């Protein structure tokens, strides 16, 4: 799997990028170019609400205007799947 993700806040107080390549993930605390998807959260509170939710709902976040997406939605759904699968593995439910 290859993917380039950028997560940030509208005021750029939060900027984190993740690059998946050759079964590895690298994290950067800066913007990267050529992203497959960029996820921009309204503010820190919107990000925390999304991350701490037991059932994160990206569509609900978009409708509430807590988040905007630029790029390929499929990459966002793949990231959500991988994060959930990791969570289930850690808790022994996968």
Image (cartoon, grey):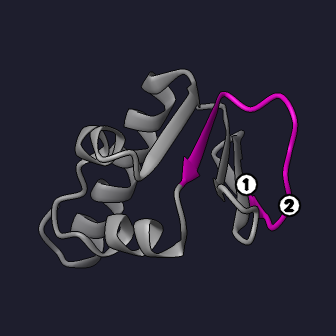
Work out whether 44 lies above or below 36: below
Categorize mark 2 by other alpha carbons within 10 Å: few (<14), some (14-19), many (20+): some
Q: Secondary structure at mark 2?
A: loop
Whichever of labels 2 and 1 marks the residue nearer the N terminus, that label is 1
Which residue is at a point 34% across and 64% down the rendered structure image? 50
Task: Answer left or right for 94 relative to 90.
Answer: left
- The residue that label 1 is drawn on is 17
Counting every numbered tag in the picture gives 2
- On the image, the x and y values in percent for residue 66 come to 41, 53
Which residue is at a point 86% across and 45% down the rendered structure image? 32
Residue at far left of view: 93
Q: Which segment is the magenta one?
A: 26-41
Spatial CA span between label 2 and label 1:
7 Å
Q: Which image quadrant: the N terminus?
A: top right
Which residue is at a point 38% across and 57% down the rendered structure image? 83
- On the image, the x and y values in percent for residue 87 come to 29, 68
Q: Secondary structure at mark 1?
A: strand
Categorize mark 1 by other alpha carbons within 10 Å: few (<14), some (14-19), many (20+): some
- The residue that label 2 is drawn on is 30
Mark number displayed over residue 81: none
- On the image, the x and y values in percent for residue 85 come to 29, 55
Which residue is at a point 22% across and 66% down the rendered structure image? 88
């Amino acid at each position: 799997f290859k993917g380039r993700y950028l997560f940030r806040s509208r005021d750029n107080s939060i900027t984190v990028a993740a690059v998946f390549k050759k079964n590895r993930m690298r994290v950067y605390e800066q913007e990267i170019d050529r992203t497959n998807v960029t996820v921009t959260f309204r503010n820190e509170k919107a990000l925390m609400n999304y991350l701490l939710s037991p059932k994160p709902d990206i569509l609900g976040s978009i409708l509430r205007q807590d988040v905007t997406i630029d790029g390929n939605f499929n990459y966002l759904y793949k990231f959500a799947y991988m994060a959930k699968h990791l969570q289930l593995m850690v808790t022994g439910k996968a």
